[in-house]
């Protein structure tokens, strides 16, 4: 800057000051996320290949090399415009299906997703049939509680039922 | 001394086998002396296993590294607490603990019911000692904890640093009490099937055993989750690891059994189903033990692969076949005594409760074993991780939570439409009100809104039940509300203890929803003095502090937490390097309030700069509070009732 004309010197000094201030602001606020949110989203769907059996996002090994490599690959591919599905497919191509944190929803793997719900539906059907049998076999409520010749307790029963209703019987 | 310890195991095996056979033959042949001898074998086996356990403990406490097990899992640098916990740190010691607990529980169950159920006890002893024999065979021939090293080391390896946490004291012990405790209702059920005494006696006799085992199994799961949360450093508490799942499945099915056994005691129904459930529970506890030791599925929890897998599989196959065969043989005598009055009744809602609990257990089981299934059928290895379980098991558990609120609102035997409307009105109103309020506050995640709404529904339903019961009691007995409430709970401890546990489940559900759906995270690399914002907080990194201990080198990073300008707390998170294990571990920093946890993980450093992962976990603490409230509910439900003793037969004891 020595020898520059005064206006230019002023401009350069201002620019330098702005740069320093901006840098200071940036540093004092701490550098942001180590990984981008988009990378984290992909990392939640694949398994870290270090052997921890955790999804990549949750791998807790300090300085884990496979984790660093996988995240680096994700970030690089995202910058190139690759879709999350394509990134995941690249991991599958490299590591096999064990790279996926969950089975695919196609082919044989569909049985993983569907069988529990089908089992519950089947169980519900069995319960329905069992209930029909049990309820159908129940003693009908129309059988009179009072036989002929006995004292009529209907007024007493009416009072008991009214009391029960008032006290809110729920079981 | 190792010879004494091993000899005690061998003798215990001989006694157990003798006791199992003699009890069965003595009962079948009405040979009183043979039965007396068999029953004495229960006490002798317990004494021998206690001796073996005491000897192993002595070796650990005296740091006798001539014993291979002691040298593998302890060192002189370990504190007393961790030295004791080394007893169950490895395969051999944990099997010995299994066997000791089983012999203890069999002894107590025998002493408890020898006069009330004398016709069942020989077969209880026979089946129980047969199970004990299996574990003793493993200990004597395949997993000897008293094996001696030809060249003992000067120092032991010590515990894996991950295990040096107070969770090591509580998590395995409570889990094992739960696992082994569930064997007691199983052996009583088998005794009932063998004898043909298929009434409710075995069920009433084992209600407290089932409750206690269920509680400890749940507690063990919770301790494990808490340990994972504070130790593993990924900010979560449940990873759907195969071994975690293996302890969750029997807990789910045991929960179903606890509920459906109520139906059998009240209405004489679901006898076959209850038998099937207790068989499934027992086999799942053995399956869990198998998973931890066989290495068939990768898990962060597994012991080193031990070669015991085929033996456990064989035991599951044989015990499962025998018990199912017995159940099939007795099926005609297990027909329901009663019928249902209505489709809409508490009984039918319990059936759906069972369906969802067993369905959830099946979903967890299927997801856990699917990698093996995939390999068998397609030759392709796959992983089934949290995204699967969250999407499949999550909705089932949510439906179960909803049912937990519906069941108490429906009367026994029959519910009328008017009754239903009256009972559901306020809880539904509470749920809708909360959902609208949360939506107005900006919550937009549909699943989170629904889950919290369901939680409000369940909580309101339980409160309504208490309110109505207290009001009825206050009116009829002219009591103040506090006395009426206390009297209400005391008059029906199992029921109201159950409601307290339901409230605890709601608390846990709220904690899970909060920490799952509303979590905030940020990662940052900071130089001393730099700050990072997360939510309403600002964390300022103050600097590093390095120090060493006997077994590790520690780097501690200190951060101060501010809410705006207001100082909130100072947190210290550490990274420790263990030279002996060549392993680096983190100690996270957690600041807990009723609303949220601030969770800080020190992930790395360069010079004085340090990298952190900072997480806000809303409502996380309610998961642990739910555990405490569960314990309270258990105490209430478990409290002795003098009337219960009158329900068990007092038959003359056979000679």
Image: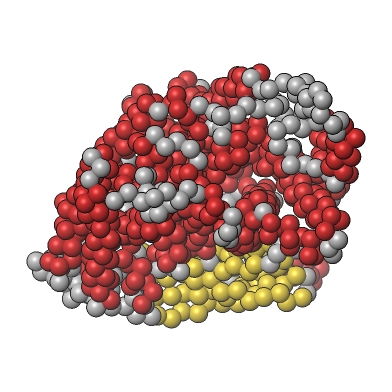
Residue nearest the observer in this picture, B349 or B413:
B413
Q: Is residue A92 above or below residue B575?
A: above
Residue A59 left/right relative to B61? right
Residue at horizontal 42%, vertical 65%?
B168
Residue at horizontal 26%, vertical 39%?
B28
Q: Where residue A34 sits: x, y (%)?
A: 57, 55
Q: Is residue B47 above or below residue A158?
A: below
Q: Which quadrant holds the N terminus of chain B?
A: bottom left
Q: Where residue B596 sits: x, y (%)?
A: 68, 62
> Would residue B44 be visible to someone looking at this image?
yes
Residue nearest the observer in this picture, B457 or B151:
B457
Snapshot quadrant of residue B447:
top right
Residue at horizontal 70%, vertical 64%?
B594
Q: Is residue B454 above or below residue A117?
A: below
Snapshot quadrant of residue B85:
bottom left
Residue B540 left/right relative to B100? right
> Would residue B389 be visible to someone looking at this image?
no
Outermost residue toward the left in this view: B150
Residue at horizontal 25%, vertical 74%?
B58
Q: Where residue B434 sits: x, y (%)?
A: 82, 47
Snapshot quadrant of residue B269:
top right
Outermost residue toward the front in this view: A149
């Amino acid at each position: 800057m020595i020898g520059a004309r005064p206006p230019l010197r002023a401009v350069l000094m201002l620019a330098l000051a702005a740069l320093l201030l901006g840098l200071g602001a940036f540093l004092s606020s701490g550098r942001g996320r180590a990984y981008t949110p988009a990378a984290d989203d992909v990392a939640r769907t694949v398994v870290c290949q270090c052997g921890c059996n955790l999804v990549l996002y949750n791998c807790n090994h300090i300085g884990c090399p496979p984790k660093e490599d996988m995240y680096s690959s994700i970030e690089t591919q995202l910058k190139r415009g690759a879709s999350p599905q394509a990134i995941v497919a690249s991991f599958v191509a490299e590591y096999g299906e064990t790279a996926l944190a969950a089975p695919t929803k196609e082919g044989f793997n569909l049985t993983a997703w569907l069988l529990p719900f089908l089992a519950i539906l089947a169980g519900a059907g069995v319960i329905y049939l069992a209930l029909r049998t049990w309820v159908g076999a129940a003693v009908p409520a129309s059988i009179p509680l009072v036989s002929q010749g006995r004292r009529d307790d209907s007024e007493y029963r009416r009072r008991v039922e009214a009391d029960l209703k008032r006290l809110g019987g729920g079981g | 001394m190792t010879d004494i310890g091993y000899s005690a195991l061998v003798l215990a095996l001989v006694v157990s086998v003798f006791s199992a056979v003699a009890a069965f033959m003595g009962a079948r042949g009405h040979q009183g002396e043979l039965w007396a001898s068999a029953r004495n074998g229960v006490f002798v086996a317990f004494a021998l296993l206690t001796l073996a356990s005491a000897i192993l403990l002595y070796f650990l406490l005296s740091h006798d590294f001539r014993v291979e097990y002691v040298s593998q899992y302890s060192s002189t640098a370990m504190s007393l607490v961790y030295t004791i916990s080394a007893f169950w740190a490895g395969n051999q010691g944990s099997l010995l603990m299994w066997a000791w607990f089983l012999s203890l529980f069999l002894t107590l169950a025998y002493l408890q019911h020898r006069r009330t159920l004398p016709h069942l006890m020989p077969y209880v002893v026979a089946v129980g000692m047969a199970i004990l024999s299996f574990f003793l065979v493993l200990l004597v021939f395949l997993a000897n904890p008293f094996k001696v090293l030809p060249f003992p080391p000067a120092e032991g390896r010590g515990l894996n640093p991950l295990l040096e946490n107070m969770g090591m004291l509580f998590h395995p012990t409570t889990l094992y009490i739960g696992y082994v405790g569930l064997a007691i209702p199983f052996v009583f059920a088998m005794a009932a099937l063998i004898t043909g005494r298929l009434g409710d006696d075995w069920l009433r006799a084992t209600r407290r055993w089932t409750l206690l085992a269920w509680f400890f199994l749940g507690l063990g799961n919770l301790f494990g989750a808490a340990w994972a949360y504070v130790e593993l450093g990924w900010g979560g508490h449940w990873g759907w690891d195969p071994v975690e799942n293996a302890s969750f499945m029997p807990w789910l099915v045991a929960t179903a059994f606890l509920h459906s056994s109520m139906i059998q005691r009240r209405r004489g129904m679901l006898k076959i189903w209850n038998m099937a459930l207790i068989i499934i529970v027992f086999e799942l506890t053995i399956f869990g033990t198998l998973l931890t030791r066989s290495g068939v599925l990768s898990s962060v929890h597994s012991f080193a692969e031990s070669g015991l897998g085929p033996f456990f599989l064989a035991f599951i196959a044989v015990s499962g076949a025998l018990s199912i065969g017995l159940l099939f043989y007795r099926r005609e005598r297990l027909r329901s005594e009663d019928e249902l009055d209505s489709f809409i009744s508490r009984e039918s809602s319990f059936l759906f409760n069972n369906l969802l609990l067993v369905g959830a257990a099946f979903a967890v089981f299927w997801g856990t074993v699917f990698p093996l299934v995939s390999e068998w059928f397609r030759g392709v290895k796959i992983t089934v991780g949290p995204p699967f379980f969250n999407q499949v098991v999550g909705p089932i558990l949510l439906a179960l939570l909803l049912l937990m609120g519906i069941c108490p609102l429906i009367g026994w035997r029959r519910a009328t439409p008017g009754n239903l409307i009256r009972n559901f009105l306020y809880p539904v109103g509470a749920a809708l009100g909360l959902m609208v309020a949360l939506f107005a506050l900006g919550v937009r995640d549909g699943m989170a809104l629904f889950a919290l709404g369901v939680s409000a529904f369940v909580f309101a339903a339980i409160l309504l039940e208490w309110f109505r019961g207290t009001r009825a009691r206050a009116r009829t007995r002219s009591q103040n509300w506090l006395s009426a409430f206390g009297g209400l709970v005391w008059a029906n401890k199992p029921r109201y203890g159950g409601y307290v546990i339901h409230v605890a489940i709601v608390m846990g559900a709220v904690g899970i929803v909060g920490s799952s759906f509303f979590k905030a995270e940020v990662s940052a690399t900071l130089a001393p003095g730099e700050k990072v914002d997360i939510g309403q907080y600002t964390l300022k990194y103050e600097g590093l502090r390095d120090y060493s201990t006997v077994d590790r080198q520690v780097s501690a990073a200190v951060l101060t937490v501010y809410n705006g300008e207001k100082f909130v707390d100072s947190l210290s998170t550490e990274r420790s390097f263990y030279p002996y294990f060549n392993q680096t571990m983190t100690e996270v920093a957690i600041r807990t309030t009723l609303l949220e946890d601030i969770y800080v993980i020190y992930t790395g450093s360069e010079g004085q700069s340090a990298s952190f992962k900072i997480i806000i976990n809303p409502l996380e603490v309610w998961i642990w509070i739910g555990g405490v409230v569960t314990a309270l509910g258990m105490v209430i439900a478990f409290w002795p009732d003098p009337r219960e003793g009158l329900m068990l037969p007092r038959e003359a004891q056979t000679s």
